[in-house]
Amino acid sequence: MTHKFTGFISDLHLSAAQPAMVTLFCHLLTDCIGQLDALYILGDFFDSWVGDDITDATSQRLIAALAAAHNQALPLYLLPGNRDFLLGKRFSQQSGCQLLPDEYVVNLYGMPVLLMHGDTLCTQDVTYQRFRRFSRRALPQTLFLLLPAALRRRIAIRMRQNSERYTRRTAAPIMDVTPEAVSDVMQKQGVRHLIHGHTHRPACHSLLIAGEPAQRIVLPAWHNSGDILLWGTDGSQTSIALDPANYHSPFTGRT
């Protein structure tokens, strides 16, 4: 008997600068068809996104690959991250991806699981949280999207550079999630399982929520290799590394 899975990936940061990783994702997406009940992308799918009206050859290739998988009955869900929070209706319609809110509870074979990108959990990073609140408001987004394409691209490049400098000089604990934020959101959503990305610190954490055992899974970022978490119908959880230089289907031999 063949067991189905639900797949989770995060922080791919795909762009024209990473052609091998773009190809790796396209290979994975093709292999997911007929094998997954759904694929969830938990933010920062693109390294940057400055509006649905601006695409290049790489983003067009990725949108076409997503649309092809959607048309072959693979349910696709994307929870925007801090790099691609401007993904909108046009992208959703063209790609077939359903866009999810910042906090989304999915029923995984009878188990409620909270999905997040994870940036809102880093509450000690006051500077970032201030910027996040501002950038998610409707007026700043509307004004930004009215700017010429070239200017938007230059702003995005400058913001990435500033972010990299900020990350290098900021203490690591400040950039990580805070236990209080994790506990608060899991209690609010009534779950004992949380999956997120953003921190680039993959791990499976055991914790207590209101005195009960709980689990927080942090997905790996795609740097020089990829990774997918497979959650099986039997509750099994398997993280599989993907080598762009020697790709093998993560589903080979999994029954």
Image (spheres, grey):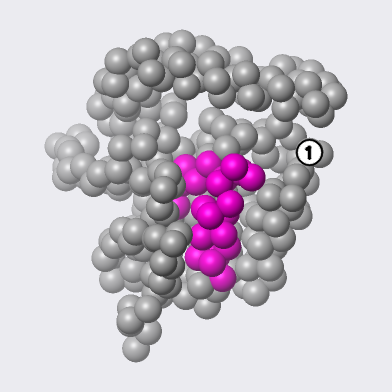
| Image quadrant in which you'd find residue 46 | top right
**x and y, in percent, of residue 237 in the image:** 28, 61
Q: Is residue 110 visible?
A: no
Q: Which residues are magenta?
A: 9-30
In the visual, does 154 lie left or right of 124? right
Where residue 219 appears, as percent x and y from the top left, is 36, 46
Is any part of residue 218 visible from this angle?
Answer: yes
The answer to whether residue 195 is above or below residue 63 is above
Query: In the visual, does 165 lie left or right of 140?
Result: left
Outermost residue, front direction?
A: 245
What residue is rendered at 44% in x and 62% in y?
Answer: 245
The residue located at (74%, 17%) in the rendering is: 139
Residue 238 is a magenta residue = no
* Closer to us: 96 or 192: 96
**Quarter occupied by the C terminus:** bottom left
Inspect the magenta stretch and tell me whether residue 29 lies in it.
yes
Residue toward you, 211 or 252? 252
Residue 52 left/right relative to 124: right
Q: Which residue is mark 1?
A: 54
Q: Residue furthest bottom?
A: 1
Q: Secondary structure at mark 1?
A: loop
Count of number-bearing discs:
1
Above or below 252: residue 153: above
Q: Quadrant of residue 131?
A: top right
In the picture, the quarter occupied by the N terminus is: bottom left
Residue 235 percent coordinates (x, y)? 28, 65
Disc 1 marks a residue whose amino acid type is Ile
Task: Tell me if residue 32 comes above or below residue 99 in the rendering.
Answer: below
Mark 1 neighbour density, 10 Å: few (under 14) some (14–19) many (20 or more) = some
- The residue lying at 41 percent from left, 48 percent from top is 224
Q: Residue at x 26, y 65 (%)?
A: 236
